[in-house]
Image (cartoon, rainbow, N blue to C red):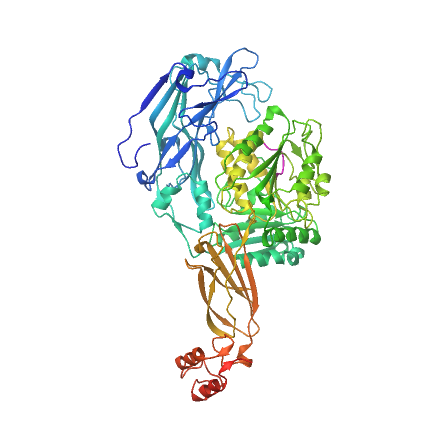
Amino acid sequence: MPTPNGPRCPRKTIVATSLALVLGATASGEGTREWISFDASPPGTAPTVENIAQMSSASKSVFHVELHGMWVQNKTIPGTTQTMQSVSLASNGALATSAVGLPELPGIPLRLACTQFRSDGGFSGESLQIVPLEQVVLDNYNIFPAQPQNGLDETGGDGEDQFYFDADFYETTTTPFPNEQARVLSGFHFNRSIPGVSCVATCMQSIPASRKLIVNTSFECTVLFEGQGASRLDLSPRAAAMFDLNYDNAPTWWQLNLAALNMNADLGDYLIVTANKYVNELWPLIQQKTERGLRVTIITTESLGSGFDHVDVKDAITNWYGGCDNKFEAYVLLIGDVDEMPMHIDPVRSLPSDHYYVCIEDELYPSCELGRYSVDSEQDLQEQIAKTMTYSETPLMFSSHYERSLLAAHEQESKNYVECIEDIASKDYWGYNPSFALYSGRDNTSTTAAVIADIQDTHYGLVLYRGHGWQFMWGDDWNILNEELMDTDVAGLTNGRYTPIMVAVACGNSHIDEVDDCIGETWMEGAQNGAVAHIGSIRSSSTKPNHHFARAFHTYYWSGYRLCVGEMMQDAWLTARMQSSSQSNAEKNIYMSQLLGDPELRPWQQSPFSLQLRELPQFVVGPNDYTFELDLEDLEFEPTDAMLMVLVNGEPMGFLRFDANGQADITLDLDSDSTVVLRARSELANAVDARYESDVDGGDTSCPADLDGNGQVEVDDLLQMIASWGGSQADLNGDGTTDVDDLLIMLGAFGPCS
């Protein structure tokens, strides 16, 4: 690896005439996938992408990339005996070219936050430059051609997805393919107000006529940015974690002070769009969001007019978003089935879509998180809110089910559903080390009854199904016994408080607009059964992007950061889009994906612990300074990662961050009828919020000389009176002045208050 500021390493090329001789492995057998290691790394080692911040600037981001190995699989051209090689990278590969019928080569996807950007949004492949440091040249590699992913017959015939092979290109091309050093996946866009671009850096080239494969096993990659400088991002610790997870050049932003930790923890915003009849049932959720420091806004559909439609709803969301101070803490919750709360229409295929409601700054990338309670009665909503509150406010403190994940897959081999969940279960996760139960659909034990019984009796924090599905079921024929898992099976669950996050990576499980209670809605019904959140597709969805999404979702879920479920879903889809060979198919899937439930819900990945405050002060009438202290004895994170919301009679008085000593200070001027609520929470830690509620002590009538409110009149009260001499703050007899008459009253009351 080159040193950040030192001379560039000379390129080293290894010419391999025999792969077995150089790398110690070969690919053999139709359909057999072999791992070819370049540095003795174990199978499945993903490429390493490191942002070299010291070599970067506001106008460029520099990366060092290492390829540790690749997968090789032999494939036969249909109707022939000709065998070709398909190559791919582990985990985070994407296609370096979209040229159908020509060699399909993987590349390195880069999701970049633009430190500078042009006003016209311009960005092209010429903005990326690659300098190879080490290469391997492999002989006898006839790279399998990329195939249609969009339902078109590339040969001009009437069929769909016909195999396409440009034989002339393979026989006559003697120069490396592709010539481009980068493929732009998405030009300039805004994602949660962050300017960004996505591209794929070329790491392999094929010389088709001579059957050679050139692999840059180590290279330096520079991405150039032009135009105006980006605005500084003030990030809370949780938003900073999300930023670091999502952008490959995050270290450059931190080095340039374009990204900075905002330890004052700006308030966030939470919008609820609902019919007026549901407001009473929403109160527990409104109270929780307010106490967590979110400013809750309610827009009633009645206020949109009697003939309101999806355009009016989006206009209302857009207007609200324009007034949000913190774009990283912005959430939208829709209430009601589609007859009360319509879906929008996506701009690509004109299909119903909730996602498009939050595409405010960009037609694909979201500006905030979005969820829906698709309910048809006040009782239905009340039960689902109760389930949300139970999960968040009173989780099970000693249960290992949060660390368990159930994965089920359709048995169809050609779609690789089972292979997808096997990839998920075999991966090492950075934050948590979950245990997995797999139901492949390919053996007699993978039955619908077994899955339902396992969810009901063993319990899981996360359940994912990967396969075919539609409005009321997992299926068609998800296992070799030709069974489905139906909405009626879900309705019969009695899993009590063990409500998982349910992810159905299948077609139509959230088909809420044309049927009454699809299976996704059934998962959500009830107060203590089914799931606490459901992710599913509104319509049919494409297979390969779904595979990428399923893997990416688990990466975010087990990342070690307490991201909310809305973020996990959206970020996993944007990651899947980068890794998909057909971006149009991936974009359709993004628009079709829907979250049923609270978008700000933060899943538990292990049994949580409770935040605790030390002995609380006594709240008394009048202006007083109060200090609150975290109990640090069993604290599992830095005190500065915890915050405290203080409310008086339901109104926020302060949103405080604890200092390094676990203390937070505030001045409160309280009336005798005041009620004080304290809620301490952490942005990152696996901790349950600490909530305290206290009425103000009426000490102004029973013990007026007790100025500091500690239950007794003593020297401290006397000193406070002397400091107030001549003023009115220690006026005990009500004449407006602190004088000797008040001193006599205090001396007569010395001792404990009665």
Residue at 73% in and 40% down: 488
* Residue 236 screen position, x and y as percent: 44, 51
- As for residue 446 lying within the magenta part, the answer is no
Q: Can the viewer see residue 368 in this picture?
A: yes
Residue 221 lies, with reference to residue 209, above or below; the image says: below
Lateral position of residue 715 relative to residue 373, left or right: left
The magenta stretch is 535-541
Residue at 58% in and 59% down: 287
* Residue nearer the viewer, 339 or 679: 679
Which residue is outermost to the top? 81
* Residue nearer the viewer, 211 or 175: 211
Residue 22 lies, with reference to residue 746, above or below; the image says: above
* Residue 431 screen position, x and y as percent: 49, 42
* Residue nearer the viewer, 387 or 365: 387
Q: Quadrant of the N terminus?
A: top left
Q: Can the viewer see residue 735 in this picture?
A: no
* Residue 517 screen position, x and y as percent: 70, 43
Residue at 47% in and 46% down: 192
Residue at 33% in and 42% down: 58
- As for residue 536 lying within the magenta part, the answer is yes
- How many numbered marks does the figure carry? 0
